Image: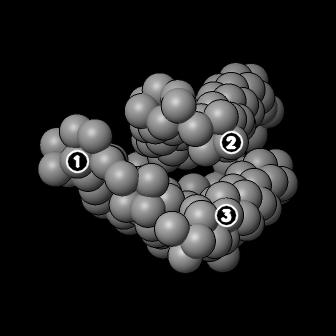
Amino acid sequence: MTILKLLDALQQLELQVAEFYRWLADEFADDRQASGVFFRLGLQEETHANLIAFQRRMIRHASGPVPVPDIDVRAVAEVSQQLREFRARNPHPTLEDALSFAASLEDTAAERIHTRILTGAESPLKALVSSLAADDLRHRELLGTLHARFARQSAAC
């Protein structure tokens, strides 16, 4: 596998996740906070895709070969499949289901994809993936905050 193919797979995944979050933002349009969180996450995932595209351009113009981390892109394909399956099973998910799946999605990306790339990556790819991994943690925290609000509201009812 070439580094460009790896980056292409990651970019496509980021775009799929961005679209997933935009869909959730629309699904929860009646809940301004939930919709806003999902919309913000979607924008950040699009930014990730743009960062990866920029990195791809940098590598194409690099003077020498860039080492390819030892990563199985099947993990990327599995996350894509999970996204499709969630949407097929949940055409109108509950907020709890959406939050739970989104948190799982962020954990899966962080653990199974970004961490593996970081283990074998050299600069400048390491800086890119470190940034993506840090954002995954922030996304998880944001989803946790929204989930806590949801839990408090559910308990009050």
Nearer to the camera, 12 or 21: 21
- Which residue is disc 2 drawn over? 33
The quarter of the displayed image where residue 155 is located: bottom right
Q: CA distance from mark 2 to mark 1?
A: 21 Å
Nearer to the camera, 67 or 107: 107
Nearer to the camera, 113 or 100: 100
Q: CA distance from mark 2 to mark 3?
A: 10 Å
The amino acid sitting under disc 1 is Asn
Identify the element where label 1 is drawn.
loop
Q: Height in image: 142 above or below 66?
A: below
Identify the element where label 3 is drawn.
helix
Q: Residue at x 23, y 47 (%)?
A: 90
Residue 13 in sight in this render: yes
The amino acid sitting under disc 3 is Arg
Mark 2–mark 3 contact, CB under 8 Å? yes
- Which residue is disc 3 drawn over? 149
Name the side, left or right, on which 106 lies relative to 104. right
